[in-house]
Amino acid sequence: MPSFIKALALLASLSTTFAAPSRYANHQASTTTTAAAQASTDLCGTADYIILDSSPWIVYNMLYNADVTVGTQCTVYDSMSTASDGTKSVKWDSVANIEYVESTNNVPKGYSFVGLTQNLENTVNAISSIPTSYNWTRTNTTTFKGNICYDFMTNDVSGDSTSSDSQELMLWLQYEGGQLPIGWGTPTATIDSLFGTSWKLYQGVNTDTGITVSSLLPDTQFDGSFEGDLKDWLLALVNLNVFAATTYVNVGNAGTEFFYGDSIMNATLALQIDLA
Ligand SMILES: *[C@@H]1O[C@H](CO)[C@@H](O)[C@H](O)[C@H]1NC(C)=O
Ligand SMILES: *[C@@H]1O[C@H](CO)[C@@H](O)[C@H](O)[C@H]1NC(C)=O
Ligand SMILES: *[C@@H]1O[C@H](CO)[C@@H](O)[C@H](O)[C@H]1NC(C)=O
């Protein structure tokens, strides 16, 4: 099993907001779609994914709390394209039809994302840049609770994203329906200027995994479009002593978390790690 898959299997065990029931442990990858032509694919099982050929990406429908999900959730791989400057992008969708259930309304049901498969397990220092562009639209026909975010994991040990000294880093771009980060309350730090806005850092331990989650929430939410070099995010966290620049970036992805609601997210993403 490639290490980025193992790392993502672990990511499935991370609830990225308030602690969720530990019901994800027995999920299996029920489908691996690697058709030669790589046609558009609907990924609707609890751990369905497609590794995109000739790209740095895996597209993943990760329903780590499928057991408490009433409804369906699919991640759709649509297509890839290459711009004239060589930048690749992937067009994908996340389609949630999840009922509101009072007792689990605060439990994230899963994470639909495009994850990196290349140039992971390098230190922050060894990375020259992480250029990204994320464009999305959300069309919901009921109240929707969830977000649009990046989620990275670091550790001072290359490839380790399971031990409790791993760090989970979230950059929230947009969130709605009352979603709150782990450690919500008094921010542990503020960042005055990053990606054109100011941010608040919330930190807390995910009691399911023992891993500290550091979430940056923008003072002004992004409304369908984000562009930047994510190395600036990592360096801002180095500056706040969350970790050192000698730490390893072991997991990186962009996606959407969902709690409930009938909602379609259509997105186009460019994301890659360039090494120094
Ligand atoms: C979509 O979700 C948002 C956030 O929960 C909500 O404010 C809005 O009313 C929803 N739209 C519809 C059509 O239900
Ligand atoms: C949005 O996603 C839905 C579900 O995959 C798809 O049917 C629709 O064509 C997409 N719309 C756009 C504009 O890409
Ligand atoms: C996002 O939209 C901007 C503005 O239209 C465009 O320049 C950029 O290439 C788009 N990004 C992707 C990944 O399609």
Image (cartoon, rainbow, N blue to C red):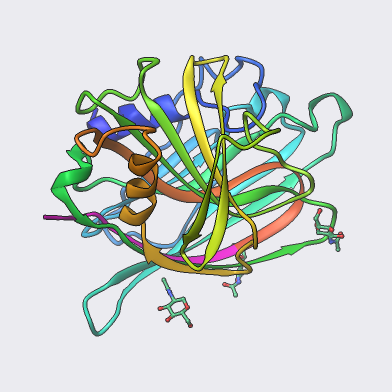
**Quarter holding the N terminus?**
top left
Query: What residue lies at 70% left-to-right and 38% top-to-bottom?
Result: 180
Query: What residue lies at 78% left-to-right and 44% top-to-bottom?
Result: 178
Query: Within the magenta stretch, is there residue 219?
Result: no
Query: What residue lies at 63% left-to-right and 68% top-to-bottom?
Result: 223
Horizontal side of 125 relative to 103 (left or right) equals: left
**Quarter holding the C terminus?**
bottom left
Q: Position of residue 238 (x, y in %)?
A: 33, 40
Report whether residue 33 is seen.
no
In the image, ligand 2 is in what quadrant? Answer: bottom right
| Near-viewer residue (94 or 148) | 148
Horizontal side of 240 relative to 192 (left or right) equals: left
Q: Quadrant of residue 95?
A: bottom right
In the displayed structure, 21 sits above or below 199; it is above
Q: Position of residue 24 (x, y in %)?
A: 56, 20
Q: Residue furthest right?
A: 102
| Near-viewer residue (261 or 176) | 176
